[in-house]
Image (tube, grey):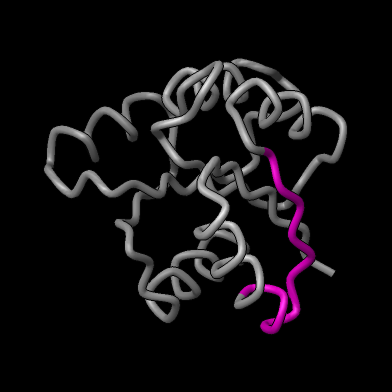
Amino acid sequence: MTKILYVEDNEDNVYMLSRRLKRKGFEIIIATDGEMGVQMAESEKPDLILMDLSLPKMDGWTATKTIKSNENLKSIPIIALSAHAMDEHKQRAMDSGCNDYDTKPVDINRLLDKINNHLN
C-alpha cells in the first residue's frame, strides 16, 4: 500500500482529505507541524508527502528544505498544499524543493492526478 505523509495543522483539512485518500487505497499518516513532518519523513519513509506551507513550529518551506537536504529522503516527492494561490507562493514552494503545488480547497481529482503522476 502506498504511504502518504500529510503534514497539516488544520483538523478539518486532515479529516476531509485523509478520509478521501484512504478510500482511494492510500495509507495516510499525519504530522501536525513542520518539525513532526520532518521527523516522520525520517522514521516512516513515505512514498509521497503532502505539505501544508503555513505550519506551526517549522513552516512547510523550511520543512521541505530540511527533507530535501537529507540524502535518504530527497527522492520523496513533495506536493505543497496551500490556500495561497499566487504565483509567488507557488514559486517559493518550488524553490524550497517541492515537486508540485496544489491549492486549497483541494480538488480531489486534480490532486489524485498529481499524486499518481509523481508515484509513477
Task: Tell me which residue sits at (66%, 74%) in the image.
Answer: 19
Q: Quadrant of residue 91?
A: top left
**Number of numbered discs visible in the structure rendering:** 0
Q: Quadrant of residue 96?
A: top left
Task: Tell me which residue sits at (34%, 46%) in the image.
Answer: 82
- Up/down of 95 relative to 105, above or below: above
- State the residue in front, 118 or 86: 86
- Up/down of 85 relative to 36, above or below: below
Percent position of residue 56, x then y? 51, 23
Magenta segment includes 28: yes
Q: Is residue 36 left or right of residue 69?
A: right
Percent position of residue 21, x then y? 63, 73
- Up/down of 1 relative to 36, above or below: below
Task: Tell me which residue sits at (26%, 28%) in the image.
Answer: 92
Q: Is residue 83 left or right of residue 109?
A: left
Start-end of magenta stretch: 21-31
Q: Which of the image's four quarters has the C terminus?
A: bottom right
Magenta segment includes 71: no
Q: Which of the image's four quarters has the N terminus?
A: bottom right
Q: Quadrant of residue 108?
A: bottom left
Percent position of residue 5, x then y? 69, 48
Task: Tell me which residue sits at (32%, 58%) in the image.
Answer: 104
Percent position of residue 28, x then y? 74, 60
Q: Is residue 11 left or right of residue 94?
A: right
